[in-house]
Image: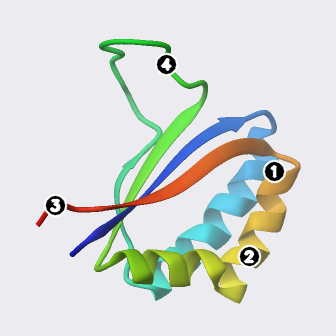
Amino acid sequence: MAGYWIGLVDVHDPEAYQEYAKRATLAIEKFGGRPLARGGRRVGLEGAEPPGRIAIIEFDSVEQAQACYNSPEYQEARRYRANAATGQFMVVESLS
């Protein structure tokens, strides 16, 4: 079953965040990740909206998403995000 990597990211240094985004994209592609949503327009329907950007990346499985996150490539990218943004990240398994 597919795994969906969901990130809620509050960017406070957009210029530095661009380097993270570039490096993270390479790691995600290496592990077969497919971006479904990155930033862009959103419409709140109920409850408090999280600040910042929402990213949804589809992987073939939860394990593949975890492997990407734990990879040396993504961990290197993550260091660039450390001073540019704060966030929450999780992986959710699809129903089918």
What residue is shown with label 2? 75
Q: What whole-number distance in Å separates the C-alpha atoms at marks 2 and 3? A: 28 Å
The residue pinned by badge 1 equals: 16
Q: Residues within 10 Å of mark 4 (few under 14, many from 20)?
A: few
**Label 3 SS:** loop
**Lateral position of residue 21 relative to residue 36, left or right:** right
Residue at 42 percent across and 82 percent down: it is 63
Q: Badge 3: how crowded within 10 Å, few (<14), some, or many (20+)?
A: few
Q: Quadrant of residue 44?
A: top left
Type of amino acid under label 1:
Ala
Q: State which tag comes first along the sequence, 1 or 2.
A: 1
Counting from the top left corner in percent of width and height, residue 15 is at 78, 45
Relative depth, front residue between 23 and 78? 78
Q: Which residue is mark 3?
A: 95
How many discs appear?
4
Q: Residue at x 63, y 59 (%)?
A: 21
- Which circle's residue, 3 or 1, is located before the other in the chain? 1
Under mark 3, the amino acid is Leu
- Residue 27 in the image: state x and y as whole percent: 57, 79
Measured Cα–Cα span from mark 2 to mark 4? 27 Å
Of marks 3 and 4, which one's residue comes earlier in the chain?
Answer: 4
The location of residue 83, given as percent across then percent down, is 88, 49
4 or 1: tag closer to the N-terminus = 1
Q: Nearer the viewer, residue 29 or 90?
A: 90
Gap between marks 3 and 1 measured at Cα: 36 Å
Please name the residue that numbered disc 4 is placed on.
Answer: 49
